[in-house]
Each structure stands twice: as structure tokens, then as C-alpha cells.
Amino acid sequence: GAITFGFLQRASSLYGTGLGNYRTVCACADTAMRLNSILSKNFCLSFANEANIKITDLSSVESIASRLQGWDALVLGSDLA
């Protein structure tokens, strides 16, 4: 989750990777705080703002599908401790 997000954020800034937009879907409102605490420890100047985080009802297929509409890839993780 958070570590993969950090690597994707870094890779998307490199020319020629073909990576564009990235985001995380989450189930709770404190994800930004928890995600940023992991990013700040592992990636210098890394930060996830509201544009990168979408709160989602993870028990609803329709909710998940609507949040992933238009995206090419999904990485699942659960390292937000």
C-alpha cells in the first residue's frame, strides 16, 4: 500500500515511464494522515493530498468500480499501520 504508493509517485515523475495519474482508494477518513506518516519516513518530500485519496465503501462493488473508472492499473496493499 503506502510503500508501493511512494514508489509509484516517484516513478511517475521520471520521463519515459509512461506513468501518469495515481491514487489510492481507502475505507476511512484518516488514511491521508496514516499514509503521509509512512511516506515521510520512507520517501523524502513525498506527500499524498486529497487529489490522490478517494474514500470508498470497500464492501460495495459499485462503489469500488466507480472510484476506479478510467484507471489502467490497481495495486492493493495493507501496510497502513
Image (cartoon, rainbow, N blue to C red):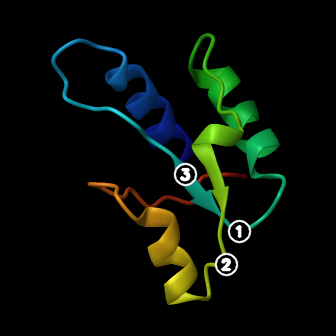
Could you tell me the amino acid type at mark 2? Asp
Depth check, front residue: 54 or 35 = 54
Residue 57, disc: 2
Q: Quadrant of residue 19?
A: top left
Residue that badge 3 annotates: 24
Residue 39 image point, x, y percent: 63, 29
Above or below, 44 relative to 41: above
Percent across and percent down for residue 68 are: 43, 64
Position of 13 compared to 48: left or right?
Answer: left
Q: Are marks 2 and 1 in contact (CB under 8 Å)?
A: yes
- The residue under label 1 is which amino acid type? Ala
Residue at horizontal 51 percent and vertical 75 percent from the top:
64
Cβ atoms under marks 1 and 3 closer than 8 Å: no
Describe the element under mark 1 as helix, strand or loop.
loop
Q: Is residue 45 left or right of residue 70?
A: right
Kindly state the secondary structure of the residue where label 3 is placed: strand
Q: Estimate the spatial distance between the alpha carbons at disc 2 and disc 1, rounded to whole Å.
A: 6 Å
Q: Which residue is mark 1?
A: 27
